[in-house]
Amino acid sequence: MLLILIGGALLRISLTDMYLRYVKDGLRPALIAAGAILLLVGLVSAVRDGIQRRAVEPAADAGHAHAADGEPVAPAPAADEAGHGHDHSAGPRAAWLLCLPVLALFLIAPPALGSYTASRSDNVVAKPAAANNDAGFPALPPGDPLPMTLADFLIRSVWDTAAPLKDRDVQLTGFVTPGKSAGTWYVTRMVISCCAADAFARKIEVHGAAAPPTDSWVTVTGRWLPNGQVQADDAMPALTAAKVDRVPTPKEPYE
């Protein structure tokens, strides 16, 4: 039964967009295959156990002895019955508790990682290869405002010495993470390499606008605010917001 539930839960997650809360998009075929295999193995095991139980019942009936007058004679008690007075054939009932986490996936699927995880994750802006290249970074595409990923904004603001973001209007989309100081907040995206277990945060401090509700998704339109934090892996770039719009949670919440 447990294999059937796990397989069903995997298929439920992977056949909808729900799986994007936990793993990268490219892992969907593997999840579907794993769910189908577990479901098949569970069904085969259930059928096999049912056949075995039906085969045991006639054998038990055939083992009853009868007295000469036709009255049945009670069989001798089994060793376990004589010694303990109970039967282990059904297995411990506590084993059914293993099904509870799987049932929870059917009823209450955990959301994607949000501000709780992001607030406990350091901002990491790894130095890109272009920063060591004589050719430098390519020119930014046209657009006013220019939509950017948080990764692009962080890299350009920290490592691009040409400062292409200066006096440039940009748009960043992410969820709201409150800062440690009152009134401070960050537009944030979580990044995963494989699954949610290896996630880390990319955060940009937002100035000039009141903080929306924690974990709400927003698109922030504004300009890079030079704060001296450049050429460092742990820099925390900032943005002066001209407009903050609430937006729906995207289908794929991770960068």
Image (spheres, rainbow, N blue to C red):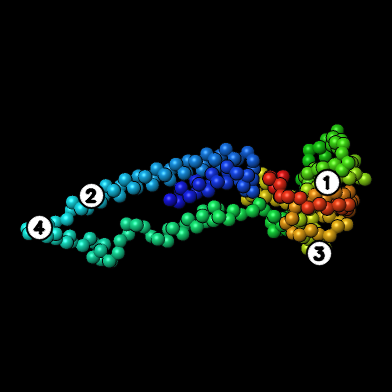
**Relative to 96, does residue 45 appear above or below in the rendering?**
above
107 or 21: nearer the viewer: 107
Q: Left or right: where does residue 1 sit relative to residue 209?
A: left
Q: Which amino acid is tagged 1?
A: Gln
Rate crowding at label 1 as few (under 14), some (14 to 19) or many (20 or more) other CA atoms within 10 Å.
many
**Residue at mark 2:** 58
**Residue at mark 3:** 181
Q: Which amino acid is tagged 3?
A: Ser
Residue 53 in view of the camera:
yes
Mark before the other along the chain sequence, 4 or 3: 4
In the rendered structure, find residue 171 and report the number of the disc placed on it: 1
Q: Give the residue drawn at x 60%, y 40%.
A: 27
Tag 1 and tag 4, C-beta contact below 8 Å: no
| Secondary element at image label 2 | helix
**Residue at mark 4:** 70
Label 2 or label 1, whichever lies nearer to me, is 2
**Relative to 26, does residue 112 appear above or below in the rendering?**
below
Mark before the other along the chain sequence, 1 or 3: 1
What residue occupies the far left of the structure in this picture? 68
37 or 83: nearer the viewer: 37
Label 4 or label 3, whichever lies nearer to me, is 4
